[in-house]
Image (cartoon, grey):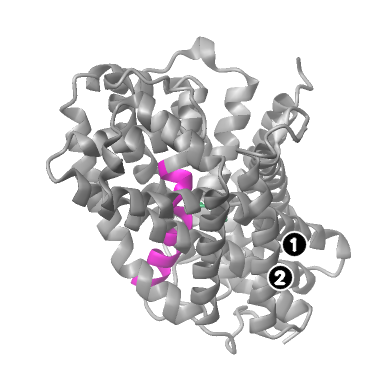
Amino acid sequence: MSSMHHKPTGGNPSRVQFNTRLGVIATTVGSAVGLGNIWRFPYEAGMHGGGAFMLVYLGFIIVIGIPVITAEFIIGRHSGANVYGAFKRLHGSPCWRVVGAIGIVASLMILSFYSVVAGWTADYIVRSVQNFSGAYTQEALHSQFGEFTASWSAVGWTVVFLLANFWILKRGVQKGIEKMSNIMMPALFVLLIVFCINSLLMPGAAEGLRFLFNPDFSKVDSSVMLGAMGQAFFSLSLGLGCLITYASYFSRRTDLVRTAATTASLDTLVAVLAGVMIFPAVFTFSQSPAEGPKLVFEVLPAIFYNMQFGMVWSTLFFVLLFLASLTSTISMSEISIAYFCEERKMSRTVATVLNTVIAITFGSLCSLSFGPLADMTVFGMTMFELFDFVSSNVLLPIGGMLISVFVGWVLSRSVIDDEVGGQGSVRRWLVSLLVICLRYVAPVCILLVFLGGIGLFD
Ligand code: PHE
C-alpha cells in the first residue's frame, strides 16, 4: 500500500468506495452545503456591504474554488489516503505533511464552533413546534435568542448535536452519509426555492435584492476580500483536506473536473438562494444586515410567521438545516478520524470517540463565549470568533495555497493527466487551464488577499 503512487492508475482499491455517481455528488455537495451557505454566507455578506462581497466571492469561487477542489480530488484519489497520509505517500519530504497537520487542526476547530450553531438549529426545531411561544416582534425574537445563546441550554444542544454526529459516524462512511444526502439535499433545495418566492413578494424585496446584487466598489477593501475568500474556502469545505479524504473513497469512474464544477455551482446556488431568502426579509422587518452571527436566526422566524402554515414550514426548514449541518460535520470529522485510524492506528471507535471528545470540549467553550465567557477575548475576539477567524480566514487559505502549489509544481504532470486528462481538445484545454490556475493564479491570489487581510499593505 505504501507504494500506491507508483502505480500508473493511482487510487487504493482496498478502501471502501462510494456506490454511485449520484452518491459521489450528493456526498460532496452534502459536505459543501450547510450552515456555511445558509447561516454564514448571509451574515458575512451583510457585514461586508452585500453586493461588493458577493461579486468578489463569486470571483474567488471561479479562480480559486474550482481549481483547488480539483487539486484536492487529484491528491485524494491518487493517494487513496487521509490528508496526512496522502502527502506522505505522494512526496518523500516531511515538509508537505504540514498541510495534513493544518487540515486536521482546522477541521477540529471548525467542528467545534460549527456544532454550536448546529445546536442552535436543533433548538429552533423545538421552538418551531412550539410556534416560538408567540414571540414574533423583532425585539422579542432578539431578546429570546440572546438569552438562549448565552445559556447552558445552548451548550446542551451543542453536545446533543455532536452525539448525533458521533452516532452516524459510527455507522461508517458509505451507509450513513450516502443514504442521507441523497434524500435530504434535494428537499432542502426545494424548500429554499419556496422561501425565496415568499421573500420576493415582501415589501422590502427590491431593497434586499439591491443590497445583495448591486456592487458598491467603494466598499471593496482588504477586509471584504479576506472575508470573501475565507467564506469561499469555508463554504466549499476547501483547504483542509476534506475533499482529499472524500476523494480517497472515489472510484476511477468519477470525473473529477465535472464533480468539482458541479459541487461549486450547487454550493454557490444554495448560498445565493439563502441570500435571496434573507435580505428582502431583513429590509422588510427593518433589521440591520450587519448584525453578525445572529442575523439569520433572528430573521427566519419572522419570515415563517408571515407565511401560511408557518409552523410547518419552520419545523421542516430547521430539520433540514440540522441534517445539512450533519452531512457537513460528518465530512469534517472524517478528516481527523481517517488520520487517527490510518496514521495513529486507532480503531474506528476510539478515533470517533476522540474526535467527539475534542469537539465537545472546545465546542462548549465556544458556546459559552456568547454568555459567561463573553469577556474572555484574544485580539478582541471571543473564542467562537477566534476559532472561526483562524480556521476560515487563516488556516484554510494557507492550506489551499499549499495544496495548489503541490499539485501545480510538485506533483508530476503525468499524475494530473492520469487523474483528470482525457480525449478531446476541450479536455486538454481545460487541463492546461487548471495547471495555470494551480501554478500561478490561485497561489498568488490567495497570498495577496491574505497579506492584505492581515494588514501588510495598509
Ligand atoms: N462547507 C460546509 C458548510 O458550508 C462547512 C465545512 C467546512 C465542511 C469545512 C467541511 C469542512 O457548511
Secondary element at image label 2:
helix
Q: Position of residue 434 (x, y in %)?
A: 56, 50
- Span of residues in magenta: 22-38
Q: Is any atom of residue 33 visible in this view? A: yes
In this orientation, which residue lies closer to the viewer: 155 or 70?
155
Q: Quadrant of residue 210?
A: top left
Q: Position of residue 271 (x, y in %)?
A: 39, 41
In this orientation, which residue lies closer to the viewer: 206 or 13?
206
Residue at figure coordinates x 39%, y 65% from the top left: 25
Left or right of 453 in this view: 117: left
Mark 1 or 2: in front is 1
Task: Tell me the amino acid under the disc marked 2.
Answer: Ala
Position of 207 relative to 449 (above/below): above
Marker disc for residue 340 = none
Q: Quadrant of residue 243?
A: bottom right
In this orientation, which residue lies closer to the viewer: 174 or 389?
389
Q: Earlier in the sequence, mark 1 or mark 2?
A: 2
Q: Is mark 2 within 8 Å of ligand 1?
A: no
**Could you tell me which quadrant the N terminus lies in?**
bottom right
**Which residue position holds label 2?**
86
Q: Is residue 422 magenta?
A: no
In this orientation, which residue lies closer to the viewer: 123 or 387?
123
Q: Position of residue 398 (x, y in %)?
A: 72, 45
Marker disc for residue 100 = 1
Q: Quadrant of residue 425?
A: bottom left
